[in-house]
Amino acid sequence: LAKVFGVNPQELRYSDHDRYLTLSRMASGEAMAAALSEWRRPASPCNGALILFLRDLWAGAGWGLLDDKGLPKACYHYVKRTLQSIAVLLTDEGGNGLCAHVINEGEGRQNLNLEIACWRNGDVLVGKGSKALTLERHSGQTLSCLEVFDYFMDLNFAYRFGPLTCDVVVATLRGDRDEIVAQTFYFPGGIDTREEKTVGLAAQASMLDSCSVEVTLRTERMALGVHFDVPGFSADDEYFHLVPGEDRRVTLRSLTPHPVSGFVHAVNANASGLVTL
């Protein structure tokens, strides 16, 4: 927790216990995603990883990706995104820069567009570039993120010629219809979760059927660790980061018909978004 988020765990535990629990859940997910990204990159000699284990045996802290009730924990969503069949991963290669690894474990050839965007101060886009890629089935490709730019940027803050070029590097894979296939984030100076008054996180909900609702999320500033508190519902994705101006659709499901009322939170904002019909 101290390494990932730069906070004092003991102080946070007693001053804001709920935040301590939320960041602790995210810290395990961030650590697992970083390790799996390193092991899954094409040049890695690792042939896989064993995760111990699927489900917690009782309530409380545990090794499982699911809790004792069978519901996904934060680390489940991190692992799911990192190990999806078509994925983009980022690793810090020191003086060799920030590298993007594009993986295709799908059933056929994939025509993709890799987009690298650099953000500063939550809402300032300081650099953006893209590169078209074609990946055969069961293949991967590694390239320097600088290949999408026609100028140098110290994306991983390896050379330290001055202040940080950006706070966040976002790698996005887009498909033939410009849809987002995969996305991952890198924070050159560490993940800054200091709370702002608001990041402009908003939610719009619509019913899909009696037991599921689709929530469309949008934010004015970079929203970190976006997660839901909607009693009776489980989200198919959460604890993700959201880029300004980019819509994200998430489905919430319930085992039985249930009123939809709750909140969506970002760990870097005091204000939360209302989720209601």
Image (spheres, rainbow, N blue to C red):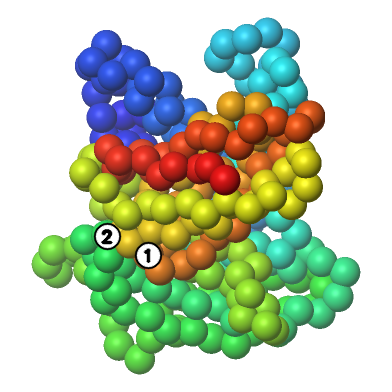
The residue under label 1 is 244
Give 153 or 95, whichever is nearer the viewer: 153
**SS for callout 2:** loop
Give 124 or 63, whichever is nearer the viewer: 124
Q: Is residue 235 left or right of residue 210?
A: left
* Crowding at mark 1 (Cα within 10 Å: few <14, some 14-19, many 20+): many
- Quarter of the C terminus within the rendering: top right
**SS for callout 1:** loop
Image marks 2 and 1: residues in contact by CB distance under 8 Å? yes
Mark 2 vs mark 1: in front: 1
The residue under label 2 is 122
Q: Judge whether 117 appears above or below 13 on screen.
A: below
Disc 1 residue type?
Pro
Q: Judge whether 142 appears above or below 270 on screen.
A: below
Residue 43 on image: x %, y %: 63, 63
Q: Judge whether 22 appears above or below 243 on screen.
A: above
